[in-house]
Image (spheres, helix red, strand yellow):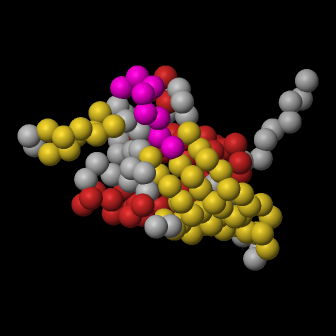
């Protein structure tokens, strides 16, 4: 076996081992979705919004250690932008910083069945149109995912100490 194949095999094995160490999960609930500020532009899109946000929080939780479960309850959702009525129905527009995405969440993080962290937070990004985020602004709930990503990273990712 040549050297490059050996190195590739070692790198692949390391990736499998390191990914196995991170496989946390998330349990996501929407509390009283009928009374949320702005869950979707149209009533029939609400289920898609909840499914997209749930899947994204579950995706973020995969960064947690395997023995951890993140429980998130969305108490309120206010999507980025505003909607207006047109001849073709409601249309959402996002421009400037007029209407940032906002969430009210209650959460708890469990490790081996014990709550290690919990809280109730209001999340927003007032400067939401001026940041770079992986993905495209045409990605469903682009701005909302960015707010959740920032919150998750700040709240659940170990901070590296400054070595200076």
Which residue sits furthest left? Answer: 87
- Measured as percent of width and height from the top left, residue 8 is found at 59, 47
Q: Quadrant of residue 108?
A: bottom right
Residue 57 seen anywhere in this rendered image of the structure: yes
Identify the residue shown where x is 49% and y is 30%: 128
- Measured as percent of width and height from the top left, residue 74 is found at 53, 59
| Dominant SS type (magenta) | loop
| Numbered disc total | 0
Q: Eyeballing the image, is 78 above or below 96?
A: below
- Measured as percent of width and height from the top left, residue 90 is found at 20, 44
Instruction: Report if residue 3 lies within the magenta region.
Output: no
- 14 left or right of 160? left
Q: Eyeballing the image, is 91 above or below 68?
A: above
Which residue sits furthest bottom? Answer: 113
Q: In the image, which residues are magenta?
A: 95-102
- Measured as percent of width and height from the top left, residue 29 is found at 51, 68
Identify the residue shown where x is 29% and y is 33%: 93
């Amino acid at each position: 076996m040549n050297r490059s194949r050996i190195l590739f095999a070692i790198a692949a094995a390391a990736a499998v081992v390191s990914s196995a160490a991170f496989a946390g999960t998330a349990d996501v609930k929407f509390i009283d979705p009928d009374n949320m500020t702005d869950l979707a532009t149209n009533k029939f899109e609400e289920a898609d919004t909840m499914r997209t946000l749930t899947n994204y929080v579950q995706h973020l939780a995969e960064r947690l250690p395997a023995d951890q479960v993140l429980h998130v309850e969305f108490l309120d959702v206010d999507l980025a932008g505003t909607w207006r009525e047109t001849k073709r129905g409601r249309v959402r527009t996002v421009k400037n910083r007029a209407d940032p995405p906002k969430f009210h969440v209650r959460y708890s993080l469990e490790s081996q069945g014990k709550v290690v962290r919990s809280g109730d937070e209001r999340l927003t990004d007032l400067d939401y149109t001026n940041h770079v985020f992986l993905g495209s602004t045409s990605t469903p709930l682009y701005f909302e995912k960015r707010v959740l990503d920032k919150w998750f990273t700040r709240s659940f990712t170990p901070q590296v100490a400054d070595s200076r």
